Each structure stands twice: as C-alpha cells, then as structure tokens.
Image (spheres, grey):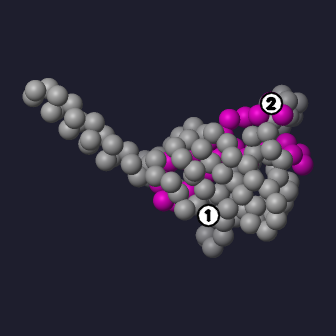
Amino acid sequence: MKNTRLMVSAVFALLVLLTPAFAQSNGFRVQVPFQFAVGNHTLAAGEYRVTVMKPGMLQVQRVDGPGTAAVLTNYIGGGPSQDLSPRLIFHSYGDHHFLSQVWIDDVNVGHELFASASELRYARAGDQGQTTLLAKGQPSK
C-alpha cells in the first residue's frame, strides 16, 4: 500500500513538472520571405502562424493565403539559459529552404523537424546555410 501511494505521488509530481512543456501553444506569427519546405510540403512565401497541436506535432498555417502543413517533431534544447525568443530556423541550400527548428517562447524547449528525403539529397550535394526568422514583434538579436 505504501509503495503504491509513493508511486502515484511520483507519477503525479512528474506530470505536474512536465505539463508546461507539453501544453498546446498559442503559437506565433512570422513573415517568411521565401518558398520553403515543411516535411514533404512546399509552402509559398507569406505570413504564417506556427502552433504546437499536441506533444510532438507542429502546424504551420498560412495566414494570408492557402497553405498548411502538420509535422512530427523531436524536443531539443531547454534549460534556464535557453534563448526563448520565438523563431523559425531553416536549413538553406542555395534557393531551397527547409524548416529545421521551431522555438516558441511559452516553453523552454525547441521543436526539431525530421529531415525529408529531399533535404537529405541537397545536404549531400552542397553546403548548408542557416536562416533564422523571428516572430512578428520580436526584437532581433
């Protein structure tokens, strides 16, 4: 009985500690000035809303026109010294941009997207650059 009570208390404490990291996000808006890929979807330049739909799943939805993609992610980073500014990080290969990471300021973990087969082909063929776009209304660092 005592072990069961201890186990229930430990599980409850763990859930309380992890809940902020897994809560659905209100997201943020960002202006993307170039065409880009999210998973297997290609999206046009425009204004997008980025939200966490559920643990490990992001949605990127165009605000000023058609275009939506939902993808699975891994959690990365975190900790007290983590930069919490909401932003998108893209891997860039010439004119081709692939969404790589999403950081949302209401939690201190990032969301890393899995590389698509298309991105892996570009990565093998050439040099990778990186482009970071901050959410609307955020100061650049």
Q: Is 112 in front, or is 55?
A: 55
Q: Are marks 2 and 1 in contact (CB under 8 Å)?
A: no
x and y percentages locating residue 56 in the rendered image: 56, 41
Q: In the current view of this chain or complex, which residue is farthest to the front? A: 1
Q: Which residues are magenta?
A: 90-118
> Callout 1 environment at 10 Å: few (<14), some (14 to 19), or many (20+)?
some
Above or below, 6 relative to 84:
above
**Residue at 63% from the left image edge and 39% from the top image edge:** 72
Whether residue 117 appears in magenta in the rendering, the answer is: yes
User: What amino acid is labelled 1 in the image?
Assistant: Phe
The circle drawn on residue 117 is 2
**Residue at 10% from the left image edge and 26% from the top image edge:** 1
Q: Which residue is mark 1?
A: 28
User: What amino acid is labelled 2 in the image?
Assistant: Ala
Q: Specify the quadrant of the image occupied by residue 128.
A: top right
Q: Specify the quadrant of the image occupied by residue 31.
A: bottom right
Q: Is residue 52 left or right of residue 49?
A: left
Whether residue 76 appears in magenta in the rendering, the answer is: no
Q: Is 68 in front, or is 82?
A: 68
